[in-house]
Image: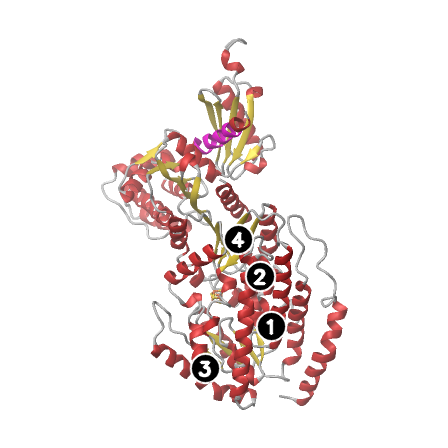
Amino acid sequence: MTAEDPIKNRDCVAGIDVGSLSTEALILDMECGTAGYAIVQTGANSTDAAVSALEKALAASGIERDQIRRIVATGYGRVSIPFSDKRVTEISCHAMGAFHLFPDTGIVIDIGGQDSKVIRVGEGGRVLDFAMNDKCAAGTGRFLEVMADKLQVALDDMGPLSLKAGGEIGISSVCTVFAESEVVSLVARNHPKEEIIRGLHRAIVNRVWSMVKGIGVRGAVTMSGGVAKNSGVVSLMEEKLGQPIHVYSEPQIIGALGAALVARRDLQDVQ
Amino acid sequence: MSLVKRARYHFMKDIGAPAVMRLSGAGRKKGPGRPKPGFGPGLNCAVRLKEIMTRHYFLSRYAEGAKPVAWVTSGAPVEILRPFGFYTIYPENHGALCGAQRLGPELCAEAEAHGYHQDLCSYARIDLGHFLSGKTPVGRLPRPDLLFASNNICQTVVYWYRVLAHQLKIPLLLFDTPYNFEDITENDVAYMVRQLEEMIPVLEEVSGRRFDSRKFQEMTGISRDSSFAWGEVLATMKTRPAPMTIFDAFIHLAPIVSLRGLPVALEYYHILLRELRERIEQGIGAIENERKRLMWDNIAIWYKVRDFSNLFAERGMNFVTATYTNAWAETISLMDADRPFESMARTYSLVVLNNSLDHRLQLMERLIKEYHVDGLVIHSAKSCKPYSVGQYDIKRLLMDRLGIPSVIVDADITDFRAYSEEQTRTRLEAFFETLEG
Ligand code: SF4
């Protein structure tokens, strides 16, 4: 690209979502929409992760740092990004992001690494109501990670494997620690992994379901967060809902997208 | 009761306590000081309240052996104890006090070390922990001669008080209130009246006094008037701006819980009410810039009252009503000094926790409308199952019916090991974002 490249004169905004496991940065061109994004591991230092995600997103989009007019931070590490202009909770950001991608969204189910939430979305992506589970690892991505480790299966393979399962083994414990020992004993008794995984997916869905019911289903359902990439969980959730679920190809970036949208809205309000 | 102890009690009551109050500064007639940022001027009455409650706990040490002492649950019909001259201690109020001073986990751990489970209500664990270790921030609680519990708030109190009765080898009076799925029946009332009547011989024996029905009626009248006054205190918050916040009410609740039926509580609420009315006349609000009005559901998070109070005030948000504070005013119009037994049965069995969720929902809808509430904070208290069950349904239904946004805060009344600052902050911030659209 050259210095005369019109892109270089455009105003852009960024959203950064610092989660417990991964950090996402997304750059939004004020005119053309998403310009690029990056996902990095959060690691021990949220600030470093935010810097590195932003740099990578800039590189991916060919945008210069000084084109970024406003940065909105979200996620549990939002307070530790000194260069952000504003902090907004992930609840509002997921609602904004999901609404932007799928405007018929009425409910967002976000299952992230350390918590899960169900958000009722109103006009323009506003949050009308939400419920959160952040007390217990069951019903979060963490639960699946622990189990994948115990089963010696790659996290990304859990979904496809469970879809191949001929049957399903019920997991009776709702607690991650108890379920872990349950899985160990099921493996020892030579139960097929696929069936155990399907049972684990069912356990997560059931766990989140009480929140879904609490908030009430209205309109289309969009899933966000890392677990939305797990086709097994999505399919069981669809079965339970009795309706299809919107899943974006990169469900993890919905929070960062929402943050960038908030930044863009703020700028437009000023202009 | 020993004569020496009685003389000592009266000496402390009339001379000792006032002297100590003066020395400790609790009774100093000074104003509430300069208001904190975000707040209007503080309540002058707070000083008087502190004096009353400090004195109550201070004197309680000298009550043992001088007066009959009873430990009572917050929902028990204490009026029946009053004519016998019992000094009443409310372990739940003591628990709240320990909670506010951040002593919850320490006292709970004492009980846990003796095998009581972490899932047991933390008021019970604090009380048992105090009982087993003697630890308390109030110096010392008097040993009871009698225990008085009612299961109109929960079943936990039944087992908790049975443990105390077993350990202390003293009588336990249990007032069993049938749960109201729909309406209360005449049979229910007769059943409860009978229980109250059967308590009298036990009370006579423990206190060494004959039952005086005139005195009983008189004290029932005082109790009724105090609860009415408390109801009026709460109703002042219907005004915009509200002259007090629900966080003030959590503190000013102490006399109606612990000193119900005694003239001191009635006097106090009259003074408080006068001050609040003056504030209304002068347009003085509890917080500087009341932009949003909120409702609180469930018992307070005692170790967070001050932090929450600041956090919300900073944003111009004021809690103006709560199902919790309302509980001591809700059924009071049923209390009738002319028919004390029967009316007592109705007043105490129709309280919010002894009623169906439908009732709770209707109550909340009414409070939301009357107090012009914009949003609701629901405390899901790990301790209190009867209060916390059904909250997700209530949340959804209030959203559906009235479009009221709400947030659930998972915490505990006193045991802050069940509380996460980070997670709560995210929820509350999301709630603020929702409210501010
Ligand atoms: S907090 Fe709840 S469970 Fe504990 S004593 Fe009170 S009503 Fe019972």
Instruction: Give the crowd class for mark 2: few <14, some 14-19, many >=20 residues within 10 Å.
Output: many
In this view, the residue farthest toward the front is B281
Instruction: Give the crowd class for mark 4: few <14, some 14-19, many >=20 residues within 10 Å.
Output: many
Closer to the chain start, of discs 3 and 1, is 1
In the image, is residue A78 above or below residue B245? above
Residue identifier under label 3: B339
Of circles 4 and 1, the one toward us is 1
How far apart, in angstroms, are the residues tagged by discs 4 and 3? 45 Å
How far apart, in angstroms, are the residues tagged by discs 4 and 1? 33 Å
Chain letter of the residue carrying label 2:
B
Mark on residue B419? 4
Q: Amino acid at mark 4?
A: Tyr
Q: Amino acid at mark 3?
A: Arg
Q: Are marks 3 and 1 on the same chain?
A: yes
Of circles 3 and 1, the one toward us is 3
How far apart, in angstroms, are the residues tagged by discs 3 and 2? 30 Å
Of circles 4 and 2, the one toward us is 2
- Along the line of sight, which residue is nearer the eye, A155 or B122? B122
Q: Looking at the picture, how far across and down is residue B302, in whole percent?
A: 57, 59
In this rendering, does residue B301 appear at all? no
Q: Looking at the picture, how far across and down is residue B161, in whole percent?
A: 49, 74
Of circles 4 and 3, the one toward us is 3
Q: Which residues are magenta?
A: A253-266
- Along the line of sight, which residue is nearer the eye, B37 or B94? B37
Closer to the chain start, of discs 4 and 2, is 2
Q: In which quadrant is the C terminus of chain A drawn?
A: top right
How far apart, in angstroms, are the residues tagged by discs 3 and 1? 22 Å
| Mark 3 Cβ and ligand 1 under 8 Å apart | no
- Asked if marks 4 and 3 touch (Cβ < 8 Å), the reply is no
Residue identifier under label 2: B249
Closer to the chain start, of discs 4 and 1, is 1
